[in-house]
Image (cartoon, rainbow, N blue to C red):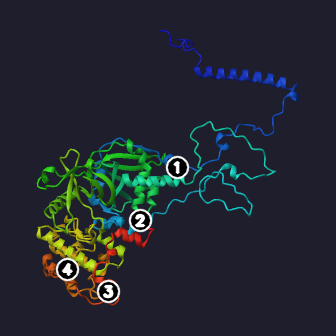
């Protein structure tokens, strides 16, 4: 059979291909040397006739990039070049990871610890505006050519704005030592970007932060109880204003490569700043990720070999919620809205949002996790039973999935005045007694309605009392969640110290003790009574005797000594006869001036309005 190559003989006497290549290269080299020798021989007699080259011509062509001013890359470009995000295809979560990230192995970060205990973050308060951010990255000086200004001492100082000055205006009027301008050819490559406006980066940053606020919502962040350097973020990703996805983001800071996303996040102090960095790093890859309809876990990992950021997509089995069927709510006769019919406005705290539904602005509360479904059912039933009670927030609707067979959240009325804890903080001791006494009576009335309906509030703190548009106090969050740290009554403190769970011990008596703390905080105008050393000091100065007695009854050590709320309500005098009280010795919470017993119109401004009037630098 003939060989497929003609130069290969059947007796293996053919010349190897490698030798052919070497011989061919040798012959080409000999030919080039031959013509080079002829050229050198011809140049010798004609050396003087060769035209001299100009002195300014470069010997060899310079790289094109050196002919143009160099621009420092932005942080986002550096991040993109350093961390190329590579999302993976969805795949099942391993058993090991599922076990390691169970809720019982997690605990909230210090920044959000109070929020889980019923304390609302000060997102609507001045403290949010005063919150310091993590130290920003110091920008390096630009490598672009600096602006050159006239050295004339009589000339005006250079402009301070960052807008690019006209090129002609920067040239000196005359300079005999100037060399002729060098004609630089136009660039022939695309994509050269010039940093002619230093405000562009700031504008992009503002636009990115606005996008972040609307699309990437940090609900919760937790670290691991084993003290390992890991974190888990619970996020709501709004693909559209009416299409939301639940995500969890897992990060491991142990042995993080240098200049990696994990290394950057480990240096930040605030959880919101970490969440923003995460969104900034993966935002361009989000459309490429195949999300689960339940809860999608994104594990971010930078490989040390190539510095690439990988996004491992898994279904988070630990956070999948078995949403209650719509059949459980047939007795609740209120409007129902699908998720696509609810438009996002802003995030308040946790899994609570300000939304637009049915032509109204309302509050949407979602089920936080798989272990809170029973609390959600309890709250819906309680609010349904308490419809029409003036001192209870009103149930406005239920939110179902788009198919309408499962309930995913509830809608309650919006109270623009904000939480009582924020009002006490913002007014800083400036609330008139008339207003505080009115709120105290409404609070006791609301708690009496709850107890008489057969329910328990369970988390009765200043954060769960809001002020509506008519300056009336209303109770929210009736879900038996439990006592946050510092609000527990004495009988539960002993159980907590012994390591027992107290969820089964929440009762009417625990509500009454927390009522005493709320009334005490209203009298003292203190927004964090849980930080005051126990037992709480007696109310003496500027407080009516009946009010002080009411607080002492609620704060009794023995649960049996705490009167029911409907009996406490009768201790308030008639609303048309103002309470008389002794003048304060060293407090400004009350006054002997009779005008302070009647409301001041300016005192009924919403908390945010009053706050901005005090300090124009504070923004909502």
For marks 1 and 2, give the CA distance. 32 Å
Please state the horizontal and vertical placement of residue 583, each as a whole percent of the image.
30, 90
Relative height, residue 485 to residue 13 (above, below): below
User: On the image, numbered disc 2 is attached to which residue?
Assistant: 619
Relative height, residue 188 to residue 108 (above, below): above
In the rendered image, the quadrant that contains the C terminus is bottom left
Tell me the element at label 3: loop
Is residue 533 visible in this depiction of the protein?
A: no
1 or 4: mark nearer the eye: 4
User: On the image, numbered disc 4 is attached to which residue?
Assistant: 575
4 or 2: mark nearer the eye: 4
Tell me the element at label 1: helix
Please state the horizontal and vertical placement of residue 209, each as a whole percent of the image.
43, 55
For marks 2 and 3, give the CA distance. 31 Å
Please state the horizontal and vertical placement of residue 358, each as a whole percent of the image.
24, 52
Disc on the earlier residue, 3 or 4: 4
For marks 3 and 4, give the CA distance. 19 Å
User: On the image, numbered disc 3 is attached to which residue?
Assistant: 591
Tell me the element at label 2: loop
Task: Find residue 78 and name its label.
Answer: 1
In screen coordinates, is 190 left or right of 449?
A: right
Structural crowding at the residue carrying mark 4, measured as other residues with C-alpha within 10 Å and reported as few (<14), some (14–19) or many (≥20): few
In screen coordinates, is 617 left or right of 122?
A: right
For marks 3 and 1, give the CA distance. 61 Å
């Amino acid at each position: 059979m003939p060989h497929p190559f003609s130069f290969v003989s059947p007796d293996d006497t053919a010349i190897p291909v490698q030798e052919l290549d070497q011989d061919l290269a040798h012959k080409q080299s000999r030919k080039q040397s031959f013509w080079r020798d002829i050229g050198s021989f011809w140049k010798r007699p004609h050396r003087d006739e060769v035209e001299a080259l100009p002195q300014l011509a470069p010997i060899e062509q310079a790289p094109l990039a050196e002919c143009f001013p160099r621009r420092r890359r932005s942080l986002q470009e550096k991040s993109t070049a350093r961390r190329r995000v590579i999302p993976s295809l969805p795949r099942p979560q391993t058993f090991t990871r599922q076990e390691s990230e169970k809720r019982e192995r997690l605990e909230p970060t210090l920044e959000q610890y109070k929020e889980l205990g019923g304390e609302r973050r000060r997102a609507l308060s001045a403290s949010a505006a005063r919150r310091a951010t993590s130290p920003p990255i110091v920008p390096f000086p630009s490598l672009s050519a600096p602006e050159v200004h006239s050295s004339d001492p009589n000339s005006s100082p250079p402009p301070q704005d960052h807008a690019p000055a006209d090129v002609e205006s920067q040239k000196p009027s005359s300079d005999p030592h100037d060399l002729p301008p060098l004609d630089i050819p136009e660039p022939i490559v695309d994509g050269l970007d010039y940093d002619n406006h230093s405000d562009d980066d700031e504008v992009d940053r503002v636009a990115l932060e606005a996008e972040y606020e609307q699309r990437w919502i940090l609900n919760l962040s937790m670290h691991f109880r084993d003290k390992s350097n890991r974190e888990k973020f619970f996020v709501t990703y709004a693909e559209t204003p009416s299409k939301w996805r639940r995500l969890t983001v897992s990060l491991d800071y142990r042995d993080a490569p240098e200049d990696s996303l994990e290394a950057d996040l480990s240096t930040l102090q605030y959880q919101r700043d970490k969440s923003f960095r995460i969104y900034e790093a993966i935002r361009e890859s989000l459309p490429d990720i195949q999300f689960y309809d339940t809860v999608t876990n994104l594990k971010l990992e930078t490989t040390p070999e190539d510095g690439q950021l990988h996004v491992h997509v898994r279904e988070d089995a630990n956070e999948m919620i078995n949403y209650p069927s719509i059949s459980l709510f047939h007795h609740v006769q209120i409007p129902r809205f699908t998720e696509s019919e609810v438009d996002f406005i802003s995030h308040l705290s946790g899994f609570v949002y300000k939304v637009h539904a049915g032509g109204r602005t309302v509050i949407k509360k979602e089920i936080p996790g798989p272990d809170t479904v029973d609390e959600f059912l309890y709250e819906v039933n309680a609010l349904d039973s308490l419809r029409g009670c003036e001192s209870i927030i009103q149930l406005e609707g239920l939110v179902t999935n788009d198919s309408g067979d499962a309930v995913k959240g509830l809608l309650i009325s919006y109270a623009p005045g904000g939480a009582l804890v924020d009002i006490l903080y913002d007014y800083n001791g400036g609330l008139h007694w008339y207003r505080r006494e009115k709120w105290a009576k409404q609070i006791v009335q609301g708690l009496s309605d709850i107890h008489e309906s057969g329910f328990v509030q369970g988390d009765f703190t200043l954060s769960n009392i809001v002020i509506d548009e008519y300056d009336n106090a209303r109770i929210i969050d009736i879900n038996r969640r439990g006592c946050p740290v510092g609000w527990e009554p004495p009988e539960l403190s002993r159980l907590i110290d012994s390591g027992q769970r107290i969820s089964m011990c929440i009762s009417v008596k625990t509500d009454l003790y927390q009522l005493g703390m709320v009334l005490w905080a209203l009298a003292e105008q203190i927004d964090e009574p849980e930080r005051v050393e126990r037992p709480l000091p007696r109310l003496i100065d500027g407080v009516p005797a009946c009010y002080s007695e009411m607080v002492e009854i609620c704060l009794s050590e023995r649960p049996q000594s705490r009167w029911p709320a409907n009996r406490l309500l009768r201790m308030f005098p008639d609303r048309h006869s103002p309470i008389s009280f002794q003048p304060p010795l060293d407090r400004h919470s009350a006054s002997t001036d009779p005008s302070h017993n009647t409301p001041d119109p300016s005192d009924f401004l919403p908390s945010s309005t009053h706050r901005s009037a005090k300090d124009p630098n504070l923004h909502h």
